[in-house]
Amino acid sequence: MKLSFLDPAKHQPLIQEQKIDPTYKELRWKVFLGIFIGYAGYYLVRKNFSLAIPNLIEEGYSKGDLGLALSGVSIAYGISKFLMGNVSDRSDARKFLTLGLLLSAFTMILMGFFPFATSSIAIMFSLLFLNGWFQGMGWPACGRVMVHWFSKKERGVKMSIWNVAHNVGGGLIGPLAILGLAFFNDWHSNFYFPGFIALAIALLAYILIRDTPQSCGLPPIEVYKNEGEVSPEAEKELSAKRIFLDYVLFNKALWFIAVANVFVYLVRYGVLDWAPTYLKEVKGFSMSESGWAYFAYEYAGIPGTLLCGWLSDKVFNGRRVPATIVYMFFVLIAVLVYWKNPPGNPMIDNISLIVIGFLIYGPVMLIGVQALDLVPKKAAGTAAGFTGLFGYLGGSVFANIAIGYIVDAWGWDGGFYVLVMACVLTIFLSLLTWKDEIKRLSTI
Ligand SMILES: O=P(O)(O)OC[C@H](O)CO
């Protein structure tokens, strides 16, 4: 699939030598801000359905049915992050990111304004599936901007800062729901209010983002950062088939991290999505206490991710695997504490949840970075999408559906055995890419 109006921006003749540095500096700030605000905007219209669930329950829907509708987002997002990631590799990131956000925002506005949109589970599933599909246009476009404007050696730190955009966007949904209700006195504002804000963000992202340095008359990032010459071949846009066959399908390390991503996402969503139920049923938390624990989990991810990116770039010299392993080891310890802590010690439950939130987003981010590192720039979106496909279709859907059945059958111990195994398997699969990473970095 290829849409010509989305074609990568054309390369321009080099600007004057003395203007290169100031222009690069200014544009790097702008494009970074553009993808940060843009991706936070994507999360505003990805996660907001959950907040409308209590009102939909009052309209007569069951939790199970609404959970099914909600899974439409994860299923479509996983497939789309991969397929649209491939389209994104052959598209202008500025237009691609904006278009996806506009379409996603319009879907949410439609869900808020037209009663038929919430009149049955099938319609909600279809619209949320569509929304998940448009959502898949966000990450790959950000990845394309990242690999073209920031060099490999600075990517750990830059990606970790960018990565907190999704915590910022995800965390803002709650306050926006409160504000929307105050402004409009209508629970449907959970759909259209973030939708309107996302429209404004899409415009801002379009103003700030530029596809590649070469489309602004600048040299490639590797030349600007003195990280080696770039052959004209490396700057050619690739066909979908070449990207997939030459760089993805037979890329062993990429397969290892994609499968590792199943287990990382299983922990990310397995802990997050089930925290309110587990804390209420086993530890006796009230709904508002669980809500605060949930909020803390999400926001603890921000410093944890930043530290992880810094560790990877500065302490491990650009290596991703050691940082992932260290973080997952401590996630494992925190999961054990969260599991084994007897009821009646809420402080320990809260601390262990905060520690898991602090730690889990580091590996989530680093697997994305590793995917970008493992392929040429022109295949970045497809590679990241490939890991996302496994993370969402494997980890997230399993966390939503299978953990529920496992807990029903074997109690919470069964669910925790799954989470512990997921931590161990992430460490094991990461270890399988240890040598490959050392070899690859020695060639830079
Ligand atoms: O789960 P995703 O696809 O929204 O990605 C979240 C983080 O940005 C991964 O690095």
Image: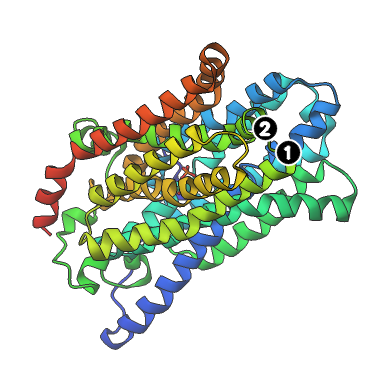
Q: In which quarter of the image is residue 25?
A: bottom left
In the rendered image of this protein, does residue 219 appear above or below residue 350? below
Q: Do the residues labelled 1 and 2 touch (CB within 8 Å)?
A: yes
Drawn side of residue 231 relative to residue 200, left or right:
left
Which image quadrant: the N terminus? top left
Q: In this figure, which colouring scheme has been used for the structure?
A: rainbow
Q: In which quarter of the image is residue 219?
A: bottom left
Q: Name the residue under label 1.
A: 286
Which image quadrant: the C terminus? bottom left
In the rendered image of this protein, does residue 36 appear above or below residue 191? below
Q: Name the residue under label 2.
A: 280
Residue 117 appears anywhere in the view: yes
Secondary structure, mark 2, is helix
Ranked by sequence position, the earlier of labels 1 and 2 is: 2
Name of the residue lying farthest toward the top: 409
Residue type at mark 1: give it.
Ser
Residue type at mark 2: give it.
Lys
Secondary structure, mark 1, is loop
Q: Look at 70% across and 19% down and name the residue there.
A: 65
